Image: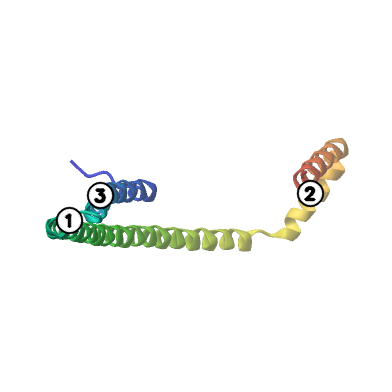
Amino acid sequence: MAQKKKTVDEAIEEVAEKATGGLTGVKDSLAKAQQSMESAKSTMQDAYGKARDRAGVAADRTRVYLEDAKKYLSEAREKMGGMAEKSRDQAEVLYAKSREQYDALSEKSKDVYEKAKLKVAEVDFKQKGDEVVEYVRANPGKAVLIAVAVGFLVGYATRPRD
């Protein structure tokens, strides 16, 4: 079964969803680090004002909490690096697809321009002008009505908008 080509908008939405998932992991790691930092702060505050022998225990507990915080911050950094790499890869893919679409559209535009240029070159404007003058002489009423309608349309299309 052929795989359906993604549009640029679908690819951007996919990158946004992946980034949101990555940011959730980073947010969780940062929240854990913040909690560990707050626990360390709380432990230090508890130790303040207590006996000296309790200070050693508090310092050990604080050290453990700070190591946990370091670990969680390291996890957050790794997740952010992975997320940045995935985003860069997706951006490169999107750029390549956009470039292909641009090149195809550019080529098609050149072809259409060349065809239009050939058609305009084939038209004999002197003959067409003579045909119009002959039609106006043969049908003056219709010619006036057509001129009024065209004038109305041009006026309506070019009038300033509020």
Residue underneath mark 1? 51
Three-letter residue code for mark 1: Ala
Q: In which quarter of the image is residue 69?
A: bottom left
In this view, the mark in front (1 or 2): 1
Mark 3–mark 1 Cα distance, whole angstroms, equals 26 Å
Q: Do the residues labelled 1 and 2 touch (CB within 8 Å)?
A: no
Q: Residue 19 or 88: which is nearer the viewer?
A: 19
Mark 2–mark 3 Cα distance, whole angstroms, equals 85 Å
Q: From the viewer's perspective, tell me whether residue 48 is left or right of residue 118.
A: left
Q: From the viewer's perspective, tell me whether residue 145 is left or right of residue 37.
A: right
Q: In which quarter of the image is the C terminus?
A: top right
Residue at left offset 73%, top offset 54%: 128
Residue underneath mark 3? 35
Three-letter residue code for mark 2: Val
Circle nearer the N terminus (1, 2) = 1
In this view, the mark in front (2 or 3): 3
Q: Is mark 2 on a helix, strand or loop?
A: helix
Circle nearer the N terminus (2, 3) = 3
Q: Residue 149 or 105: which is nearer the viewer?
A: 105
Circle nearer the N terminus (3, 1) = 3
Three-letter residue code for mark 3: Gln
In this view, the mark in front (3 or 1): 1
Could you tell me residue 116's position as x and y percent?
57, 58
Tag of residue 132: 2
Q: What element carries label 1?
A: loop
Could you tell me residue 32's position as x and y percent?
23, 50
Q: Quadrant of residue 81?
A: bottom left
